[in-house]
Structure formats: structure tokens, C-alpha cells
Image: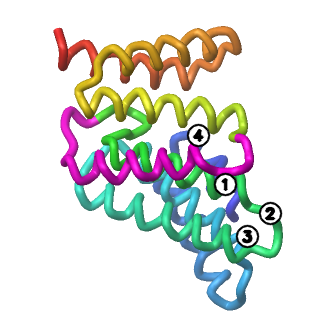
Amino acid sequence: MIHKAYILHDQGKDDEAMKEADDAERLLSLGECYEDAAEISNIKANIILSSGQNSHEDRTRILLHLDKCTHYCKKAAVDKTFPAVQATLRRALVHLGYYQHGLLEDVPKSDVDTAESILEFISKQPEPLSERSKVYYTYGRSLLAHRKGDRSTAIELEHKMRRKCEAHNLTLEIQQLDMLRTLIRSKNE
């Protein structure tokens, strides 16, 4: 059910994907399988993150699911470091106004401060980030710099990631960098 939810989400069938995730979550409540609970929370956050609503309620739900994901990753019997880091990075990005289909124009200073703390925490982790996590970490740093008014750092980090993503033909990440570039330019030009 979890894998079916991911596939349906990738196909843009988010209502059906959420139904599969909800059904999987109900089945899990019968026992304790933290690995699966983490995956369910992760897919639910992804579905809402890409839904296109950008409402305060959506942000609250996304953050709840990402928190649950990291909580269950810590309790899992197997190593769930990678998904925990990914969820933590996405949490920072959500605080910075990130959605998969767009970026909020403005976010509260308290959210910027929270995101800065999260990114600082990630930078101090003993294990190196995966290549994908490095992309989203740098994206977060660029968006954070923009939110704090440091345009030159925001542009520099965006260009650095763009070169890396173009070299590896990462089209989704390039589209997200385009959103970031538009936000940086629209606010400062």
C-alpha cells in the first residue's frame, strides 16, 4: 500500500495516493512497525507538499507528518538516517515557504529563524549528507539567505546548485531552482 501510494503520487493521483496511505496507516495501528510508519508519514507529507494549496492548514499538516516521520525513523530497528535527514531538510524548506510547485513570497521571521536552526543542526551532523541531501541543503541555504536579505549569497548558492544539477540533468531540481531564481529576482529587481 505504501509503494502504491508513492506510485499514485508520482502519477499525480494524490487523492488515491492519500487513500492508500490512510489505509496503510490504519493497518499499521494494529502493530508497531516504525519503519513503515515513517514511510507513511513521509508520503503523506509529500502528497500535501505538492498539492498546490499553500494554505496555513497544509503547512501545519506537512510539518506534523515530517515530525512524525523523523520520530518514527529514530525508533526504527533498521537504520533510517537517510529518510530522517530528508524529512528534516524538507521541514526547514517548508518553514522557508517552499512547496514543490512554488515558493511563498513572504514567511514570518520566526519560521526563518526555525529553518536557520534546522539547517545549522544538519550542518553539524557527523555523517556526510547524500548527494541528493546536499542539493536540498544548499537550496535551503540559498532560500534562507534570500529570506534574510543576503541577495549575493542567495544568488551564489543558486548558481552553484544549478551548475551541479545541469551537469547531472536533474530536471525536477532545475525547475525548483528556476522558482528560487524567480523569487530572488522579483523581490530585488
Give the crowd class for mark 4: few <14, some 14-19, many >=20 residues within 10 Å: few
Dominant SS type (magenta)? helix
Q: CA distance from mark 2 to mark 4?
A: 29 Å
Q: Position of residue 129 (x, y in %)?
A: 69, 40
Quickly name the residue at label 4. 11
Element marked by disc 3: helix
Q: Position of residue 32 (x, y in %)?
A: 71, 86
Element marked by disc 2: loop
Quickly name the residue at label 2. 79
Q: CA distance from mark 3 to mark 4?
A: 24 Å
Image: magenta residue range: 104-128
Q: Nearer the viewer, mark 3 or mark 4?
A: 3
| Nearer the observer, 71 or 154 | 154
Q: CA distance from mark 2 to mark 3?
A: 9 Å
Q: Nearer the viewer, mark 2 or mark 3?
A: 2
Quickly name the residue at label 1. 83
The earlier-in-sequence mark between 2 and 3 is 3
User: Residue at 70% of width from left, 15% of height from top?
Assistant: 168
Numbered circle sitting on residue 35: 3
Q: Nearer the viewer, mark 2 or mark 4?
A: 2
Which quadrant of the rendered structure holds the C terminus? top left
